[in-house]
Image (spheres, coloured by chain):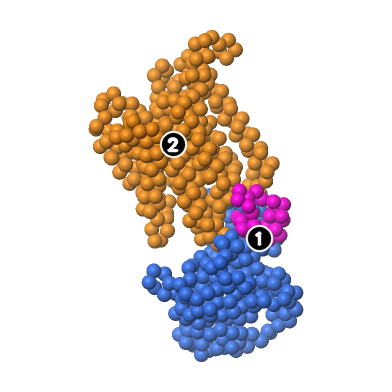
């Protein structure tokens, strides 16, 4: 489905430019010397073993993990020069949802995505409501407005988190294992949405996943991390080879072509 | 009531809460050991109504409003429906400050409210530090931290009271349980001023608190300056609790009971919960104090005993939930 990509409606620009990025927690180094560029309209998948620094990299991009070296710019603007609100209006994050002790309705939750666009006290405007309803519709959550977040199923909740990110109208989406614990149907819904979002609004997305096949199917670029450094970066077919998988994950894998779309297909051999 | 939030809703809530408070104030003014017929008041009735009951009812209202809105804001900030100034030890911190002012700086003006504020702020910061571990903050850990601070400050208070003479000691013990009989004009002005400032500051953070209620990380991602919001809420709550305790003692469970009932009625959106808690907290303590005055009249009960009788079962319910 990715082979016949539409012509981009927006001029291609640099969505993310990272160079020499380093992140440290206390004295432990989580990332060092990470550099990559991502153009608008493209989806980047970050792959790598547990503890390779994937989440730290995602966190560094919206400055929720402080940089200890290097620089990151989003849509040509240095993140160090931006306020939290400005970053939030450019970058939306989809992380694992944590449970709340308070009853929060789906609509309230999704309207949270509008925070960066609202003035201080923040009454919800007609536009806020329209954008939130549109996001709910895209995530197949029509009719869920008044349901409570902690009454939803795992797939519905994850779609609500994505709807909140879409409601922020941020052009860059960062997703931290958005499809973990989801059934294949829900995984598909989420990745399709991320793809179409990147293509239609001149945005782009960075997705952390543990599934190399999903990454190969949906992403334009793959960033393979190992021990806080970039092991390889490029198109799926050049990064996902049996050599790189052995080097990074320490397992043997057969890499052949997907019979329909020709993307790399990885089968682990244990 | 859940979902979107707009101006008309806000207005409706405001009118209903004002009405509720007005009814409570009317009851508080009319009920008492000396029944008052509003339509045929003599000189004595007028004095009782305006010089004795009115200041007391106003003080009850400002104290209740301060404690309830502080509780609501702390609960959202700490993501814990059990957070409450009294149970977290913040009230005890303020009580210790007040007592220090009473014992050592009695002649210095404003020393008691300022020290009460300092005590409340200190207790808040210590509880937060104890409750927050590397793994994050659990509800149980926060409650335990509150117990530690409460008992620690209580023992300091007991040590200090040993220097008080017997007459003052009795008054002080009564005050510790919540006592609104010291309704001087000065106390009313003090609590009203701090309520105006602290209440507005807290309400201005209600949208950010909605997001922090879900998670600090979520809030940060969505554009909230979480460190600044935390500072504003801690400082405002300390101001409100400090003034309320300096004027009316430690009236417990108001900050737990009122926001809980408000959330049951209107959902968790802090743009509702904070202003509603302010008005309902005022009404709640006005009514509780009326009961405290009337129940065994002409003698009085400490108002804190009444609020605790209502609040403790709600605490147990929330803990088990």
Rendering colour (chain B): orange
Q: Which chain is blue?
A: A
User: What residue appears at the point 64 percent right and 85 percent down from the top-left corner?
Assistant: A263
Report the residue marked by disc 2: B243
Tag shown at residue B38: none
Is B184 or B299 nearer to us in this picture?
B184
In the shown orientation, is residue B245 left or right of residue A82?
left
* Residue B186: % across, % down: 45, 28
Cα–Cα span, label 1 and label 2: 41 Å
- Tag count: 2
**Dot 1 surroundings within 10 Å: few (below 14), some, or many (20 or more)?**
many
Discs 1, 2 touching: Cβ within 8 Å = no
Residue B252: x and y in percent read 42, 36
Tell me if I can see residue A138 in this picture. yes
Q: Which residues are magenta?
A: A109-135
- As drawn, the label of residue A167 is 1
The answer, for residue B63, to whether it is visible in the render is no
Judge from the rendering whether residue B116 lies leftward or rightward of residue A75; answer left or right.
left
Q: Is label 2 in a helix, a strand or a loop?
A: helix
Above or below, A97 against A231 in this view is above
Q: Nearer the viewer, mark 1 or mark 2?
A: 2
Query: Residue A264: image x %, image y %?
Result: 61, 86
From the viewer's side, name the closer residue of A266 and B174: B174
**Measuring 65% from the left and 68% from the top, which residue is drawn there?**
A171
Q: Magenta stretch: residue A127 in it?
A: yes
Residue under the point 45% across and 47% down: B234
**Side (left or right) of A203 relative to A97:** right
User: Which chain is indicated by disc 1?
Assistant: A
* SS state under label 1: helix
In percent of width and height, residue B15 lies at 64, 34
The chain under label 2 reads B
């Amino acid at each position: 489905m990715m082979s016949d990509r539409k012509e981009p409606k927006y001029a291609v620009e640099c969505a993310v430019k990272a160079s020499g990025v380093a992140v440290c927690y206390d004295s432990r180094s989580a990332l060092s010397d990470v550099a990559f560029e991502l153009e608008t309209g493209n989806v980047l998948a970050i792959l790598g073993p547990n503890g390779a620094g994937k989440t730290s990299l995602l966190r560094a991009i919206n400055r929720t993990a402080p940089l200890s070296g290097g620089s990151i710019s989003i849509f040509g603007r240095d993140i160090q020069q931006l306020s939290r609100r400005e970053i939030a209006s450019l970058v939306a994050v989809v992380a694992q949802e944590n449970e709340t002790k308070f009853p929060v309705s789906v609509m309230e939750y999704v309207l949270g995505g509008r925070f960066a666009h609202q003035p201080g006290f923040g009454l919800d405007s007609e536009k806020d409501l329209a954008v939130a309803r549109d996001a709910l519709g895209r995530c197949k959550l029509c009719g869920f407005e008044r349901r409570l977040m902690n009454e939803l199923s795992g797939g519905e909740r994850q779609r609500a988190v994505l709807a909140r990110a879409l409601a922020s109208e941020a052009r860059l989406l960062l997703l931290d294992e958005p499809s973990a614990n989801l059934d294949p149907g829900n995984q598909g819904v989420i990745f399709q949405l991320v793809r179409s979002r990147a293509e239609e609004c001149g945005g782009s997305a960075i997705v952390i996943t543990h599934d190399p096949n999903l990454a190969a199917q949906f992403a334009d670029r793959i960033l393979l991390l190992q021990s806080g450094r970039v092991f390889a970066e490029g198109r799926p077919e050049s990064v996902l080879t049996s050599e790189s998988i052995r080097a990074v994950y320490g397992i043997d894998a057969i890499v052949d072509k997907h019979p329909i779309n020709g993307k790399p297909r990885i089968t682990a051999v244990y | 009531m859940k979902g979107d939030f707009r101006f008309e809703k806000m207005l409706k809530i405001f009118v209903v809460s004002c009405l509720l408070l007005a009814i409570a104030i009317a009851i508080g003014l009319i009920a008492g050991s000396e029944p008052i017929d509003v339509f045929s008041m003599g000189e004595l009735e007028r004095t009782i109504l305006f010089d004795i009951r009115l200041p007391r009812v106003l003080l009850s209202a400002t104290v209740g409003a301060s404690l309830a809105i502080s509780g609501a804001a702390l609960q959202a900030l700490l993501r814990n429906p059990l957070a409450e100034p009294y149970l977290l030890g913040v009230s005890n911190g303020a009580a210790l400050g007040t007592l220090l002012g009473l014992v050592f700086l009695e002649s210095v003006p404003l020393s008691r409210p300022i020290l009460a504020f300092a005590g409340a702020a200190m207790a808040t910061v210590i509880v937060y530090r104890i409750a927050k571990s590397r793994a994050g903050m659990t509800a149980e850990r926060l409650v335990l931290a509150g117990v530690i601070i409460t008992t620690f400050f209580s023992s300091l208070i007991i040590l200090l009271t040993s220097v008080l003479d017997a007459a003052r000691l009795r008054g002080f013990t009564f005050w510790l349980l919540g006592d609104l009989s010291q309704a001087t004009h000065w106390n009313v002005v003090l609590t009203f001023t701090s309520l105006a400032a602290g209440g507005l500051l807290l309400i201005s953070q209600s949208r950010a608190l909605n997001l922090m209620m879900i998670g600090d990380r979520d809030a940060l991602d969505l554009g909230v300056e979480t460190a600044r919001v935390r500072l504003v809420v801690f400082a405002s709550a300390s101001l409100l609790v400090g003034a309320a305790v300096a004027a009316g003692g430690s009236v417990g469970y108001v900050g737990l009971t009122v926001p809980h009932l408000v959330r049951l009625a209107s959902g968790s959106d802090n743009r509702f919960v904070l202003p509603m808690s302010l008005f309902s907290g005022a009404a709640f303590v006005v009514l509780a104090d009326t009961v405290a005055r009337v129940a065994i009249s002409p003698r009085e009960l400490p108002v804190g005993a009444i609020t605790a009788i209502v609040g403790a079962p709600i605490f147990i319910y929330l803990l088990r939930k």
